Amino acid sequence: MKMKIIFFSLSLFLITGATFAQKKDTPKSIISEKVGIKKYHDKEELDRMQKGQLLELYIERIKLLVKTLPYIAFATKPGVTMSTLGIPNTKDNRETLEDEFEASDAFLETTLNFQRTMLPYSDKSNLIAAIIFYEDTMKSLHQYSEFHN
């Protein structure tokens, strides 16, 4: 009986280790799965929003662009991995991609801290113009994607 428990425990340990090792080597998406605009806005709609809502929308658009624009030579939508593009899924390549994600996250954190501190001092009309510009940029990315695929 004791031998069965030891065998079962050892088997469970090995299966768990193999499962985690496989997940670590799984190719990551170059563009985060969380990236996407649920709704585009027109000027009239933005004019009706409170400044606080505009600030959050502006920040959301910045996040989206930072997580998308640097990678448009590879992809414009989530789900594309290094393997999809023919890039070898080696340890070095995975580490390079992970380093890039960490650097982008650090940049984004600094930028968002700045935006949350300074943006409330901006004019509402400038916020609206910037949001429309950012959303037009995202629409252009979708058009770019259609022409190059």
Image (cartoon, grey):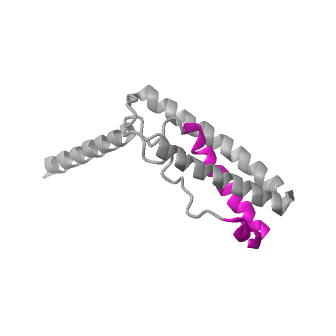
Screen quadrant of the C terminus: top left
| Observer-nearest of 80 and 134 | 134
Residue 144: x percent and y percent? Answer: 53, 44
| Observer-nearest of 41 and 9 | 41
Q: Is residue 51 above or below residue 82?
A: below
| Observer-nearest of 47 and 62 | 47
- Residue at 30% in and 46% down: 16
Q: Main secondary structure of the magenta part?
A: helix
Is 124 a magenta residue?
A: no
**Segment colored magenta:** 42-71
- Residue at 31% in and 42% down: 17
Left or right: residue 21 compared with residue 140: left
Residue 70: x percent and y percent? Answer: 59, 38
Q: Residue furthest top?
A: 92
Residue 97: x percent and y percent? Answer: 50, 34
- Residue at 47% in and 46% down: 146
Q: Is residue 122 above or below residue 74?
A: below
Tell me which corner region of the image, top left, top right, bottom left or bottom right, holds residue 14: top left
